[in-house]
Image (cartoon, grey):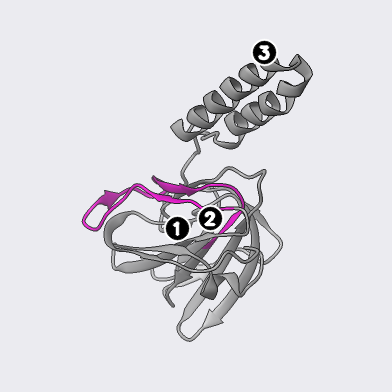
Amino acid sequence: MVVDGLYYALALTAGGALLSWLTRPVFGLPLFILAGFCLWFFRDPEREIPSGPVAVSPADGKVVLVRSEGPFTRVSVFLNIFDVHVNRTPIAGRVTGVSYQPGRFLVASRDQASADNERNTMTVEGDGTRVVFSQIAGLIARRIVCYKKPGDVVRTGERIGLIKFGSRMDVLLGPEWNVQVRPGERVKAGSSVLARRKDQ
């Protein structure tokens, strides 16, 4: 579990206990339920990382877009409030860029969110390829967390951060990648293959 979930749960439980003591136990119940939800929401399950020349999904959720953009292919994954929100790197390599950009908080399932919403973009280079991926805030998500900085070395599927509550992840893949997913498919961070290298 991500430690943030414990903090939220403890605060809500304390609030529920105080409200129950000052009024009636039934009035504290909604806060206890929210505390339980936070413990569940911030879960961080282990994942089996596939081997070989693959790019894995950086997030749990539903693929909402696969689109060619010049020599690149953009794959977008929408995370609803029930998905695991811990994010992982698609490939192994060295982090060569981390860039935060403020923005709006449109519904993350909309294509416009990729351009307009608050985001944190990371670039990882390794084994002759480069993958760029963005953590994008949504209507509810107002907190992007990134654990990595330029110069860090990461393994395929390694945890790199999280986005609290509903959000979106965009991945830009170069022409050396053969995309394996289509819109409508559900994927899991670290274990679902988004693409395979054509040249390996």
> Amino acid type of disc 2?
Val
Q: Quadrant of the C terminus?
A: bottom left
As measured in the structure, the alpha-carbon distance from the residue carrying label 3 to the one carrying label 1 is 55 Å
121 or 7: nearer the viewer:
7
Query: Which residue corresponds to mark 1?
Result: 54
The residue lying at 60 percent from left, 24 percent from top is 15
Compute the Cα span from label 1 to label 2: 6 Å
User: Which numbered circle lies on residue 192?
Assistant: none
Q: Which residues are magenta?
A: 141-169
Side of 187 where 143 appears, left or right = left
Q: Which residue is mark 3?
A: 21
Residue 180 visible, this orientation: no
Query: Where does the image place residue 125, in percent across and percent down from the top left?
Result: 29, 64
Q: Measured from the top left, where is residue 135 in percent x and y?
A: 47, 59
Residue 75: x percent and y percent? Answer: 55, 68
Question: Measuring 60% from the left and 37% from the top, which residue is drawn there?
Answer: 41
Measured in 3D between alpha carbons, the distance from the residue under mark 3 to the one under mark 2, in whole angstroms, is: 51 Å
Q: Is residue 149 above or below residue 6?
A: below
The image shows a total of numbered marks equal to: 3
Q: Earlier in the sequence, mark 3 or mark 2?
A: 3
Task: Label 1: state its secondary structure.
Answer: strand
Above or below for 153 versus 31: below
Which three-letter amino acid code belongs to the residue tagged 1?
Val
Q: Which residue is mark 2?
A: 193
Q: Is residue 151 above or below residue 25?
A: below
Number of residues whose C-alpha sits closer than 10 Å to that of mark 1, classed few (under 14), some (14–19) or many (20 or more): many
Do the residues under discs 1 and 2 have CB atoms within 8 angstroms?
yes
Q: Is residue 178 above or below residue 142?
A: below
